[in-house]
Amino acid sequence: MTDAEDLRRRTTALLAAHPPATTDRLDFLRARFDAGLAWVHFPVGLGGLDAPRSLQAVVDAELAAAGAPGNDPGRIGIGLGMAAPTILRFGTDAQKQRFLRPLWTGEEVWCQLFSEPGAGSDLAALATRAVRDGEDWVVDGQKVWTSSAHLARWAILIARTDPDLPKHRGISYFVCDMTDPGVEVRPLRQITGEAEFNEVFLTGVRIPDAHRLGEVGEGWKVAQTTLMNERVAIGGNRIPREGGMIGVAAADWRARPELRTHDLHQRLLTLWVDAEVARLTGERLRQQLTKGQPGPEGSGMKLAFARLAQEISGWEVEFLGEDGLTYDDWTMRRPEGVDFTGREAGYRYLRAKGNSIEGGTSEVLLNIVAERVLGLPPEPRTDKDVAWKDLPR
């Protein structure tokens, strides 16, 4: 049984064999994966040691103290938080061996081809088609709001493989090669001036059947694993007390006493308490994850994250007055990630508007919490047993 002391010994051995000061960054990350110290709760041979998830913090602390390089999780968050757990649960042995190591080291960036212009909140209404052609599937359609598509080597993709079945049952799940000549990525400029999102056009894209995850027609089941992990990844990041956006707001309050008012003070205190409650709830959720896959509770965390991000950023802009309206650069650019704490208040305020849309809209997540957490009666769904091809569009 792997325990904390065993992990410390393994980490010490890794550092001795591959000193961070003299070892190439990528070589170190590969060695760490091969030593089972990438994500310790994964199986042996796939970057882990079948150890409790909670022991990852032991490894991370030892490596941080030694100045070891990280794998830049902000840049490869979709791969780490969504693709990896889905591949682990539904992938074949060959798929796990092929994809997980370069995914974790950051050699291959991943994106998510789920939402469509006519299938955002109602994702199961998607129209992108995948038609079997021998050992391949030929995919045609359009996806939208695709983070990191301009950087990605691979994508997790859901497409309709049987239009004669109801919308939730005629979907299959694939790994798509973003370098295929039929893949076209176009930037979507946001209110921030940047284009971290994209729209993706798929024209005659050929995907080998060997790159299908799960059984044909069971893509919705596979996608639920991705979506539950996505919401935990967005709303359940581990941060210290007074970390994240509430930490920035508190620092502004301490640094600018001349701007303080009683009303702003009371609102900041309320937001600070809400942020701490969300942080502690996230810790409890991560403890539950040590016992299995994430459940619908992650939707509640994502809801809280979106609300807090918007309310805190709004408070900060109001507190700073004219200074809160400044913005560093409206130049069109395609960033590799989102920096909520390293930019100015104006950026945080604008970017936070997307938090209640991305990763599942707040309205959809409220339904999930109501039905799957609180056990309330579901909304009537008249299209549940109707063939997708017969649905009005």
Image (tube, rainbow, N blue to C red):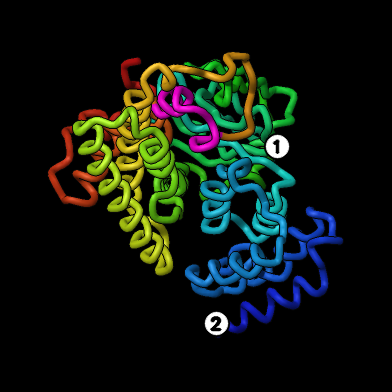
Camera sees residue 222: no
Q: Which residues are magenta?
A: 338-352
What's under tag 1, amino acid-wise? Arg
Instruction: Locate the C terminus by quadrant.
Output: top left
Q: SS at mark 1?
A: loop
Mark 1 — residue?
Answer: 153
What residue is shown at x 40% (from left), y 69% (from top)? 291
Residue reaching furthest to the right: 22
Considering only vertical position in the picture, is 98 above or below 168?
A: below
What residue is shown at x 24% (from left), y 37% (from top)? 265
Tell us which disc is closer to us: 1 or 2: 2
Mark 2 — residue?
Answer: 3
Q: SS at mark 2?
A: loop
Residue 347 magenta-highlighted: yes
What residue is shown at x 34% (from left), y 21% (from top)? 390
Front residue of 248 and 82: 248
